[in-house]
Amino acid sequence: MTNASTQALLAIYLGETYAEIEVRSLPLNKKSKALFKKNYFLPQSSLKTTLNQVQKKLTELNVQITDSYVVCRYLERLKTFRLGGSVVQVVHRGFENSYVVENTSRVSLAASALVISVADDFSTEFFTTEMIRIKKINPDANKVVIELDSELIPTVDIQKIKDFFIELGFKIFACDKPQDLLQVRKTLLNAGSEGTKEEIISELKENFKYGDGENETCTKVHFWIKDQFQFNDSNSFENFDLYFSSQDFLSYLLKQSKKNNLIHFDLENWMILNSEQKNIWDSPWGLIHRNYNVITPIALHPLTEILIDETSRLQFSKTPASSEPGPMIAGRGVKSLLIDLFWSDIHSDPQFKTLFPQLENCLLQTKIESQFKVLEKGQRSESKELTKADLIEFVNELIDFELELKLGHPASEIEKTIWTGHLSGLINKKSVPFSWTDSIYQYLSGK
């Protein structure tokens, strides 16, 4: 890096649906200032496009990023997908797809067609033949989970199998206890999540790369894992830990606050987090060992749809709407979502101006108001028709009631709770404005 350039750190919250990005100059102290800060709604701006926009702006400012610090909820999008489409499994004969034996209704972690089952008499020729078969099924297969027990197959032979795949350019994931289905699932999840983790790392490194040849450097990527940031290249964490990154960060904030509960109202997640811990994760793919703080979801969700049912009464949808096209405040949505109720508050909040710039358009504001008028006029019941203002009041009452029921005390009792999330101020006017990146920099500066 040249002396003429300003060296800086990049903090990023990479959510399922939005990213919050902030860059501050080095050294990180009271005088360090924000050189860049912006939020992005990812359904309308991919990670690649988002980071490319940030890179262009920082190039204009002659800023170079030495390190990137990531709090991640991005892998949440994988929870509804079948994983393992490019993952080969090497298992003992008779252990094919054993990880689903406890519950076959779970989302798949592996492709049965990519399983290689071995007995004691395997050979290099056997694996060569099997790889010809697998490459016909999926030419892009590039990861392998080796589920072999050294008590059944000699360690030297297991190493030969690993060397065979290393020579083919495969990334190796080893599970030495194939009888432990929780460990098998964890290893398969590590392999199935590798591509998404590498996507994040490669986009950061590609966009924040400087110099050329032997002098080329790129940003170092650190992920929040458990209770600290961990450097990606140190192999100090497993891929499945990234599913807990944002939750672990909130657990750290709860611990720092020395309060009983954390109430989180974000653009994509409303929940209560407390200090109680569990050690088994009931994941979409099955049970997996992992320590984490207990969370209690709130019944309503920011993307809950407000609609009129067959009896012409207002109802809330049982499941959230899709983030694409998203809420009306994002510009393309056509459904009345709960977050749209608060469009005027969101419009006046500086944190949201870069996330939903379309809200500056008066036509969009009129469209949102008209949509709620349609809901109001469409009601047919003997009770009072709920206007938009009535709905806001009703939603707040529902949330307050649920929070008090689950907490055992009013949620507004500040001495017992900490509020986080961009939308927390809409529910609790006493809550302090929240920023993921501000919290990251507070940690990095030791405050």
Image: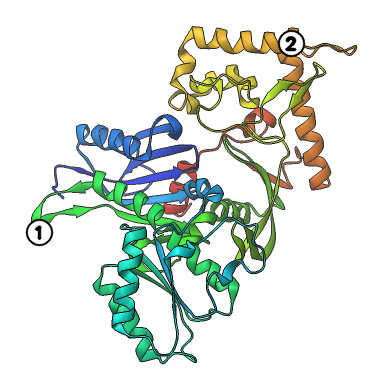
Task: For marks 2 and 1, give the CA distance.
Answer: 66 Å
Q: Which residue is mark 2?
A: 376
Rendering coords of residue 288 (x, y %)? 60, 66
Q: Amino acid at mark 2?
A: Glu
Rendering coords of residue 66 (x, y %)? 27, 51
Residues 31 and 310: in front is 310
Rendering coords of residue 74 (x, y %)? 47, 46
Residue 169 in view here: yes
Label 1 neighbour load within 10 Å: few <14, some 14-19, many 20+: few
Q: Amino acid at mark 1?
A: Glu
Query: Which one is in front in this view, the residue at disc 2 or the one at disc 1?
Result: 2
Q: Earlier in the sequence, mark 2 or mark 1?
A: 1
Is residue 97 placed above or below 374 in the rendered structure?
Answer: below
Q: Is residue 250 left or right of residue 27?
A: right
> Which element carries disc 2, helix, strand or loop?
helix
Report which quarter residue 402 is drawn in.
Answer: top right
Given the current orientation, which residue lies at the most extreme right position?
Answer: 382
Residue 289 in view here: no
Q: Which residue is mark 1?
A: 214
The residue depicted at 81 percent of the width and 41 percent of the height is: 404
